[in-house]
Image (cartoon, grey):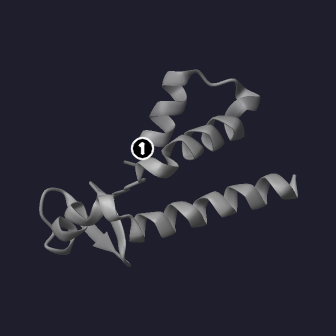
Amino acid sequence: MLALIQEYIDLIDEILQTNRTATNLARARKLGQNSKGSYTLDNRLLKYQRRLVVPESVRTDLITASYCSLAIAYPSKSKTRKLVKTRYY
């Protein structure tokens, strides 16, 4: 159980670090600096419509972790997508 929690914490750290440093988010980051196009920067984290932007390089890991943490309840693909979409972009 602790190993699973540590994996999730490591994933969150990776998402936050990648959000702050991903070169493919540079254009969106510039928009966020000027609060244009629904992008904002909050504590150097890029957000879109108040949701954290998740770079493509870690999206699959986030979706997998979200699904696995909910697997006990057997959520469908659409329910998992909806749950992730409310917090992340």
Amino acid type for the residue under numbered disc 1: Thr
Where is residue 84 drawn, in percent x and y?
49, 41
Left-right relation of 71 to 54: right
- In-front residue for pair 42/55: 55
Left-right relation of 67 to 85: right
Q: Residue at x 42, y 47 (%)?
A: 56
- In-front residue for pair 85/3: 3
| Furthest residue in direction front, as rendered | 23
Left-right relation of 6 to 2: left
Left-right relation of 32 to 77: left
In the figure, residue 76 lies in which quadrant?
A: top right
Where is residue 57 drawn, in percent x and y?
47, 50
Classed neighbour count for the residue bearing mark 1: other residues with Cα under 10 Å, few (<14), some (14–19), many (≥20): few
Q: Is residue 61 depicted above or below 24 in this figure?
A: above
Q: Is residue 87 depicted above or below 66 in this figure?
A: below
Q: Residue at x 13, y 57 (%)?
A: 37
Q: Residue at x 51, y 50 (%)?
A: 58
- Residue bearing mark 1: 86
| Furthest residue in direction right, as rendered | 1
Q: Is residue 12 depicted above or below 59 in this figure?
A: below
Q: Residue at x 42, y 40 (%)?
A: 85
Where is residue 21 drawn, in percent x and y?
40, 70
- Secondary structure of the residue carrying numbered label 1: loop
